[in-house]
Amino acid sequence: MGNGGALKKKPGKIAVIGLGYVGLPLAVALAEHFPTVGYDIDKERIKTLNAGHDWTNEVTDKDLKKSPLKFSAVKDILKGADVFIITTPTPIGTNHQPDLGPVLSACKSIARYLSKGAVVILESTVYPGVTEMKCGPELESGTSLRCGEDFFLGYSPERTNPGDKIHTIHKITKVIAGQTEAVTDLMEVIYGAITHGNVFRAKNIKAAEASKVIENAQRDLNIAFINEAAIIFNQAGFSIYDVLDAAKTKWNFLDFKPGLVGGHCIGIDPYYLAHFAEEVGFEADLILTARRTNDAMAGFIAGDISKKLKHGSRVLILGLTFKEDVPDLRNSRAVDLIWALKERGLNVDVYDPIADPEEVHREYGIRLVDSLTIKNAADRYDAVVGTVSHRAFRKLKAKELEGLLKKDGLVGDIKGIWRGLEFSKGIRRWCL
Ligand SMILES: NC(=O)c1ccc[n+]([C@@H]2O[C@H](COP(=O)([O-])OP(=O)(O)OC[C@H]3O[C@@H](n4cnc5c(N)ncnc54)[C@H](O)[C@@H]3O)[C@@H](O)[C@H]2O)c1
């Protein structure tokens, strides 16, 4: 393996491949310091970005319009780049197995644009070994250059959190690891320019890859424990939220909240770790049990709420996106709840002011109701169930919720956001 001595000290042109929740903010941040381009296979995404709008709401229209970043769905935009950063999705396929298709297809696209001294950095969440054992060979197969001699690899996990305006790309500590010290030095120059937080040099690429999957698997496990506790206390007739209020006064109690665990990170990445465990001959029981516990929450909630409603009752679900205040619908577990309620003979409507109605219909076949205004008393619901704590829902007053309900209606509060509200006599409550 070469020593990477041929590497430049600074990037000449950076290309970001995959301009989604992670790639776009990264590319915009990089473009403030280095010549940067973005490539995405989704022509519609490129069209709206070129029109100055980011549908993920991670970059404001103002920041996007003033950014020197150039984007295209034509691969030739990659020409002349000496640093390639891959931020394509890492979903799971059948049997919860990692689907590396988008990462490997990004490698395929990059390969013919590699030149001597180029560096390919993977940011997508993967299990240990993917960068060197999967991406390296895939890149080599599309070029005459040799990995580790002519071009080099690096890994830097993405830590930003959709909708989180505090732990942004400019403030978080960025973990980096290169195939050689010179690659890590170059990565330090690149990432050091965009974050005021630290740049942490992980021991090697595998350690950096593993750090990301355990961060997310740890969250999943902690939430699973709280979900299990929520079910136990619910069956005993009291609320986990009252328990948490007391428990979190202890200095070292970990304050996780119960609920539906969706999205494409916390609900997916543990499967990458479990797959890696399998590769090394170990069955990751704890990790998979936590996944099952969290995936079972929708069924438990539907079962318990439906016991309080007559067959054919009308239920309004508030919130469909996978988490509060983001439009991201991927792997939404609120959808599981809707199907589970329907299976139990209930009629379900859904309202989400943040989700894109067309996308909801395309992805899930659900037509969202378009407002919370009820014109006729006959249209009132038997139950309103809050699944996601969007700002608009946190702000709802008791009167507004009651206005949606029949006189003996039920307020279902999965996220505990309406615990402080006083309702009129007759209104029933269900809380985790
Ligand atoms: N969203 C997050 O908060 C977050 C946080 C940390 C890590 N991650 C990880 O980052 C990676 C990307 O996640 P995301 O949320 O940005 O995904 P995303 O779906 O929002 O964006 C991915 C983009 O890549 C594009 N794409 C897919 N295949 C491509 C290809 N072959 N060539 C070019 N473009 C391609 C898609 O069109 C899409 O625009 C995943 O591995 C994810 O687990 C995401």
Image (tube, rainbow, N blue to C red):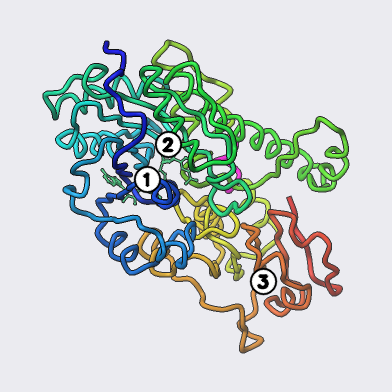
Separation of disc 2 and disc 3 at Cα? 55 Å
Q: Are marks 2 and 3 in contact (CB under 8 Å)?
A: no
Q: Which mark is residue 34?
A: 1
**Label 1's element?**
loop
Residue 415: percent from the left, percent from the top?
70, 54
User: Is residue 300 covered in magenta?
Assistant: no
Residue 385: percent from the left, percent from the top?
65, 62
Q: Residue at x 51, y 75 (%)?
A: 369
Give the mark, 1 or 2, whose residue is nearer the N terminus: 1
Q: Can you name the residue that lies furthest to the front here?
A: 9
Q: Which mark is residue 382?
A: 3
Q: Are marks 1 and 2 in contact (CB under 8 Å)?
A: yes
Q: Nearer the viewer, mark 1 or mark 3?
A: 1
Quarter occupied by the N terminus: top left
Q: Which one is in front, 243 or 206?
A: 206
Q: Quick check: 110 left or right of 425?
A: left
Residue receiving disc 2: 190
Q: Can you name the residue that lies furthest to the left here?
A: 144
Separation of disc 1 and disc 3 at Cα? 57 Å
Q: Amino acid at mark 1?
A: Phe
**Label 2's element?**
helix
Q: Residues within 10 Å of mark 3 (few under 14, many from 20)?
A: many
Separation of disc 1 and disc 2 at Cα? 8 Å
Res 4 → quadrant: top left
Q: Amino acid at mark 2?
A: Ile
Q: Nearer the viewer, mark 2 or mark 3?
A: 2
Please state the extent of the stretch shown in magenta in the rendering: 293-298
Q: Residues within 10 Å of mark 1 (few under 14, many from 20)?
A: some
Q: Residue at x 31, y 29 (%)?
A: 8
